[in-house]
Amino acid sequence: KFPKLAGQSWYADLIRRDNVILSPHVAGWTFESYYKLSEVAADKIIAFLAS
């Protein structure tokens, strides 16, 4: 459960429906995305230190 959503009245109605599937958003957390995130962060740090 998302703590901020669990107390909402519409959330309880939503999760009871047979035609609703709730899943966490994890599509962006792959090895490739971690690599790219690290690469971008390193590039930004280098650019900042060079300026």
Image: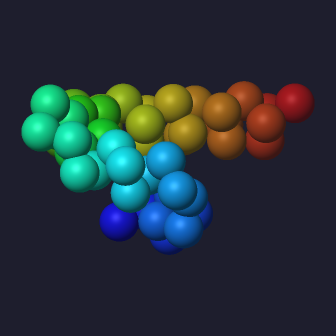
Question: Which one is nearer the viewer's eye here, 10 or 41?
Answer: 10
Q: Which residue lies furthest to the right in this view?
A: 51
Residue 35 in percent (x, y) is at 30, 38
Residue 22 in percent (x, y) is at 23, 44
Residue at 47% x, 65% y: name it: 6
Question: Which one is nearer the viewer's eye here, 8 or 3?
Answer: 8
Q: Is residue 12 above or below residue 42?
A: below
> In this image, 37 relative to 26: left or right?
right
Q: How is the image coloured?
A: rainbow
- Image quadrant occupied by the N terminus: bottom left
Question: Which one is nearer the viewer's eye here, 18 or 49?
Answer: 18
> In this image, 17 relative to 6: left or right?
left
- Quarter location, residue 19: top left
In the rendered image, is residue 46 in sight?
yes
Residue at 30% x, 34% y: name it: 28
Residue 50 in percent (x, y) is at 79, 33
Residue at 34% x, 44% y: name it: 14
Question: Which one is nearer the viewer's eye here, 31 or 4?
Answer: 4
In the rendered image, is residue 26 in sight?
no
- Quarter location, residue 21: top left
> In this image, 2 relative to 28: left or right?
right
Q: Is residue 26 above or below residue 44?
A: below
Please state the total of marks drawn on the protein image. Answer: 0
- Image quadrant occupied by the C terminus: top right
Q: Which residue lies furthest to the left in this view?
A: 18
Residue at 12% x, 39% y: name it: 18
